[in-house]
Amino acid sequence: MKISKNVREKFAQAKAEADAFIDKRAAELAKLAPGVPVGVIRNTIIGHGCACLDAMKIADEIERENA
């Protein structure tokens, strides 16, 4: 089964948005941990190997923190 170019583009866009969200959250957390490289923080908050799943997990955690 072939995936259409349009679907591939949607996947790529979703991944780019998820990566941007994760990068933003890592930068926010880095402000709370001076001296810890943002890359280390990013690797700590991700874990599924799928940026979209990781972004949803992080968003859920933020919602719980702000509840």
Image: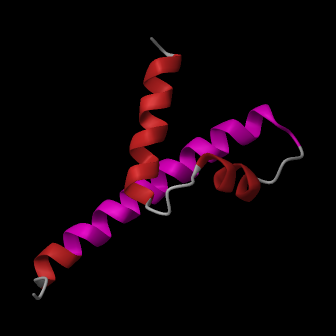
Between 61 and 22, the residue placed more toward the observer is 61
Left/right of residue 52 with respect to residue 9 in the rendered view: right
Main secondary-structure element of the magenta-colored stretch: helix
Give how far across and how far down residue 8 sits, in percent. Answer: 21, 77
What residue is at 49 percent from the left and 29 percent from the top?
Answer: 61
User: Residue at point 49% right, 27% down?
Assistant: 62
Residue 24: in magenta span: yes
Q: Is residue 11 left or right of residue 26?
A: left
15 left or right of 61?
left
Residue 37 position by quadrant: bottom right
Note whether 19 is above or below 58 in the view shown.
below
Indicate the position of residue 25 as horizontal and vertical percent values: 57, 42
Please state which of residues 38 and 60 is positioned toward the viewer in this rendering.
Answer: 60
Name above or below for residue 67 compared with residue 30. above
Residue 36 placement (x, y as % from top left): 84, 48
Q: Residue at x 49, y 39 (%)?
A: 58
The quadrant of the picture occupied by the C terminus is top left
**In which quadrant of the rendered view does residue 12 lie?**
bottom left
| Color style of the picture | secondary structure
Residue at the extreme top of the image, as rendered? 67
What segment is highlighted magenta in the picture? 9-34
Count of numbered badges drawn on the protein: 0
Quadrant housing the N terminus: bottom left
Q: Is residue 46 left or right of residue 41?
A: left
- Seen from this angle, which residue lies furthest bottom? 2
Residue 39 location in percent, x, y? Answer: 72, 58
Magenta region includes residue 55: no
